[in-house]
Image (spheres, rainbow, N blue to C red):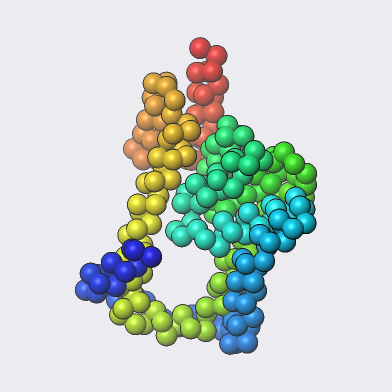
Amino acid sequence: MLGGINGFALLRDGPAGSNGELPIKVSRAVSAGSLALFFGLLATLPLLASATGNQALAYFDAFYRVGSLVFGGGHVVLPLLQAEVVAPGWVTDDAFLAGYGAAQAIPGPLFTFAGYLGAVMGPEPNGWRGALICLVAIFLPSFLLIFGTLPFWQELRKRPDAQAALRGVNASVVGLLLAALYNPVWTGGIKSGGDFALAAAAFLLLYVWKTPPWLVVALCAAGGAILALT
């Protein structure tokens, strides 16, 4: 919110965004229904999960809230996910970071990390059922918001004040990414000089020698196993 306010006030002189036509048309009735469902689930899922004590509902509620409240996507989701699954003891911190590392070896959005978490979480339902519940829950808010805002987005994105606010939001996401890099990635993964050396080597492999990410992950896993034995 602060990024948007600062962008609105200070970043009005940036380049204009694209004003091309959106490829999908959505009626206002579908838009209203999608927004009603989005906010309805956001408000009622915590109450239902608490009242029933159903573990599947608790999973769905936790991942739905993460998908609803994250800004910037990608690595910004890590602190929110960690708070939802590690704090209550559903997943250990080591298993969380190991899954995050493995997720870097596959293409696609980091939200697919939710499938891994759903499969390895301790209380049932887990396995493929837990993976399916968590994947649907974390992706559903995005679809509801897209269909809910499409009829208004075409006009909104043409407004200079809206474009300025979005510039501020985009800038603030960089700060959120740096925060996620520090906690939980740095605080949870870098615990010794050997860990730091391994991370530095991975950085050089990715950004200097352009090594494929899946190979960097595999090499770091091997390096971590060697460090554990020494």
- One can see residue 87 in this view: yes
| Front position in the image: 26 or 182 | 182
Percent coordinates x, y for residue 156 in the rendering: 41, 82
Would you place residue 46 above or below residue 84 in this image?
Answer: below
Query: Within the image, what quadrant is residue 50 found in?
Result: bottom right
Question: Position of 184 compared to 120: left or right?
Answer: left
Query: Within the image, what quadrant is residue 206 found in?
Result: top left
Would you place residue 200 above or below residue 29 in this image?
Answer: above
Which residue is most to the top? 230
Which residue is most to the front? 51
| Front position in the image: 16 or 2 | 2
* Residue pictured at 70% horizontal, 53% vertical: 58
Would you place residue 34 above or below residue 79 in this image?
Answer: below
Question: Position of 33 compared to 217: left or right?
Answer: right
Percent coordinates x, y for residue 192 in the rendering: 42, 22
| Front position in the image: 18 or 31 | 31
Percent coordinates x, y for residue 101 in the rendering: 53, 38
* Residue pictured at 33% horizontal, 75% vertical: 163
Quadrant (top left/top right/bottom left/bottom right) for the N terminus: bottom left
Query: Within the image, what quadrant is residue 85 found in?
Result: top right
